[in-house]
Image (tube, rainbow, N blue to C red):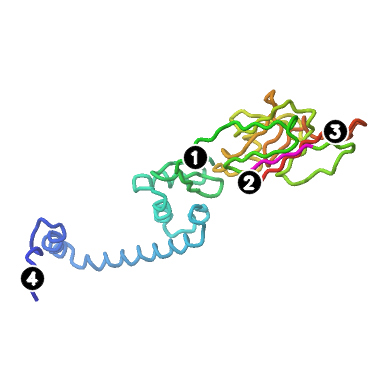
Amino acid sequence: WREDASNLDPQHLRNRIRCELVPLLDALRPGWDVGLNRAARLAMEWRTSTLDLLAGVKPEELPLSIVKSAPSPRHLISLWGSQFGAVAGQLDALISLAEPDTETGKYCSTSSHRILRERDRLLAMSLAPSDAPLNWPQSLNPHSDKEGEIHTPQGTLKWSVCHVTKRPDIDQNEDTAQLNLCALKGPLTLRPWLSGDRIAPLGMDGQQTVSDILTQRKVPHATRPQMLLLEDAEQHPAWLVGHRIDRRVALPETVSPTGLDILTLHWFPN
């Protein structure tokens, strides 16, 4: 064989380890390499088991039950978080999010994602900027336009107006709302809900905040900012889209002899 002269150059770290550190370890702790190999095999078993656990879940979701069952929860969270830009210095923050008493809605951000605590899981959401700013609010005027539609990043809202002389059957689909057009002051506005927004839910007494309704319906914190609220020109809420109708604009139990104008809205989420 021919010896490469660079193998003895102490400027290279690998050479200092081989020529200086290894002989010192042999002198101080004979058999140290056996223990190192044993630790390496254990670490490989942990990694294989952890990767098997992660293979059984959606990449962007980490159920807390999986964290509990991992041979090393810290290792599992580290491997999972690294997919979404988490670095070693953020590992403690991720582990804190997975603690049993951490409240839902807390999060930490990496260079590319927001890691959010949901009730029973961690959720990774991309921080990629949207292609264009959204133009809110969106307006519709069913008092003059008998039908139409609005397109949003969350989905499409279609509406139509009809005149009836008897109360129709109520559509039980939560993505459909049938409202008393006479109880609404036009034009109507569709917008993202805001903290403090309140609605008087049909079938209930009093009012509730939109936030409480979304909590009761177990809407994930990650998707709550996408929820939309329809209100009239006097800023009275009419429909928390896909969730609750305000009882003040609901269809009456009986229809007068002159009939009733009904606004029917259909929501088609993306």
Decide: is 37 above or below 135.
Answer: below
**Label whose residue precedes the other's in the sequence (1 or 2):** 1
Question: Label 2 sits on what residue type?
Answer: Pro
- Real-space Cα separation, disc 4 to disc 2, in angstroms: 68 Å
Q: Is residue 203 visible?
A: no
- Real-space Cα separation, disc 4 to disc 3, in angstroms: 97 Å
| Residue to which mark 3 is pinned | 260
Q: Residue at x 42, y 42 (%)?
A: 109
Q: Check residue 218 for magenta coloring.
A: no
Q: How would you classify the magenta stretch by its main secondary structure?
A: strand
Q: Which mark is residue 269?
A: 2
Span of residues in magenta? 156-161
- Real-space Cα separation, disc 2 to disc 3, in angstroms: 29 Å
Mark 4 lies on a secondary structure that is loop
Question: Label 4 sits on what residue type?
Answer: Glu
Mark 3 lies on a secondary structure that is strand
- How dense is the environment of label 2, judged by Cα within 10 Å: few (below 14), some, or many (20 and up)? few
**Label whose residue precedes the other's in the sequence (2 or 3):** 3
Location of residue 81 in the rendering, given as x and y in whole percent from the top left corner: 42, 51
Question: Label 1 sits on what residue type?
Answer: Lys
**Label whose residue precedes the other's in the sequence (1 or 3):** 1
Q: Quadrant of residue 182?
A: top right
| Residue to which mark 4 is pinned | 3
| Label 4 vs label 2, nearer the camera | 2
| Residue to which mark 1 is pinned | 106
The reply, left or right, for residue 74 in relation to residue 187 is: left
Mark 1 lies on a secondary structure that is loop
Is disc 4 in contact with disc 3, using a CB cutoff of under 8 Å?
A: no
| Label 2 vs label 3, nearer the camera | 3
Q: Nearer the viewer, residue 126 or 64?
A: 126
